Amino acid sequence: MNYKGLTQTVEFSGIGIHTGEFSKVMLKPTNNNNVNFITEGKFISPNISNVVSTNRSTTIGIGDAKIFTVEHLMSALYCLYITGIDIIVEGKEIPAADGSARVFVEKIVMSKIIDIPNEIKVVKINDLIKYQINDACYEVLPADSFIISCELITDKSNFVNNQKLKIKITPETYTSQIAYAKTFCYLEEVEHLLSSGFGRGGNFENVILIDRNKVINPEVLTYNDDECVRHKILDFLGDLSLTNLYYLAEFRIVNPSHYANIEFCKQLLQILHSN
Ligand SMILES: [Zn+2]
């Protein structure tokens, strides 16, 4: 299995979901075998040690230079096996687009992807790894492919509670089953979110708004009954990409959050390095 590269520059622009500010992002093909963010003239490598915040989204940074909400773009790059690019960000946040990874996947695929003669670094998991933090739980089991099983358990909404999905992740399944799943938010949290300075770019088109037993804007759903768990898998893949490794393993996760994902990834890397 080889990495893929871009043949031309790909551009996105729009409002960030949390800052509400306009930003422009360019993916420029390079001759390196890595992905680098560049903002304010600083290079920021997308890896776990550069994560500076996991509050509501995953933010990477070095010193004062920060890029908010990298997870949806990173998720798409990771699952399409893209490498060899500089990601030039003019602004503070990756654009929200429709709240999913749809626009990233579509523009990348449309730009003509090529095979790069570098084999993908895959780690085979041989022993069970378990990690629990707050109400989130992670298990990694040996498997012959890359599988994610995710389950959401919550008393906040009957719609979200018990959503679960097990899926083998390939570029094809990612594109058809995960990439179009939108961000969701509970109605009861909107006020607090806005007053804490988050969600300023959120609207009825880019967020699934959930009241106790119903979706307030069901017309934006792509996957109907289980879109929330699909989005949680999308987010998890974006956060897992920051380990810069691929896995032959099944990840069984319950109630993931960005904070829990990143803490889990730190543990995972520590365990892999000590073996
Ligand atoms: Zn997300």
Image (cartoon, rainbow, N blue to C red):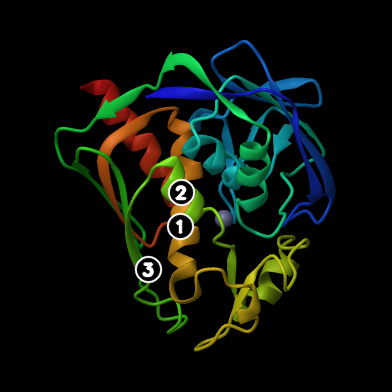
The residue depicted at 43 percent of the width and 31 percent of the height is 243
Find disc 3 in the rendering and name its residue.
152
What is the crowding at mark 2: few (fewer than 14 residues within 10 Å), some, or many (at least 20)? many
Q: What number is the disc on residue 174?
A: 2
Q: Nearer the viewer, residue 48 or 176?
A: 176
Quadrant containing ligand 1 = bottom right
The residue depicted at 24 percent of the width and 22 percent of the height is 274
Where is residue 113, by image quadrant? top right
Determine the residue located farthest toward the bottom in the rendered image. Answer: 213
The amino acid at mark 1 is: Gln
- Of labels 2 and 3, the one closer to you: 2
Find disc 1 in the rendering and name its residue.
177
Q: x%, y% of residue 235?
A: 50, 51
In this rendering, would 249 be left or right of 99? left
Mark pair 2, 1: CA separation: 5 Å
The residue depicted at 44 percent of the width and 14 percent of the height is 118
In this rendering, would 242 be left or right of 124? right
The amino acid at mark 2 is: Tyr
Q: x%, y% of residue 138?
A: 29, 51
Mark pair 2, 3: CA separation: 19 Å
Mark pair 1, 3: CA separation: 17 Å
The amino acid at mark 3 is: Leu
Determine the residue located farthest toward the left in the rendered image. Answer: 127
Residue 174 in view (yes/no) = yes
Label 1 residue near ligand 1, CB within 8 Å: no
Q: Secondary structure at mark 2?
A: helix
Counting residues from the start of the chain, the first of labels 1 and 3 encountered is 3
Q: Secondary structure at mark 1?
A: helix
What is the crowding at mark 3: few (fewer than 14 residues within 10 Å), some, or many (at least 20)? some
Label 3 residue near ligand 1, CB within 8 Å: no
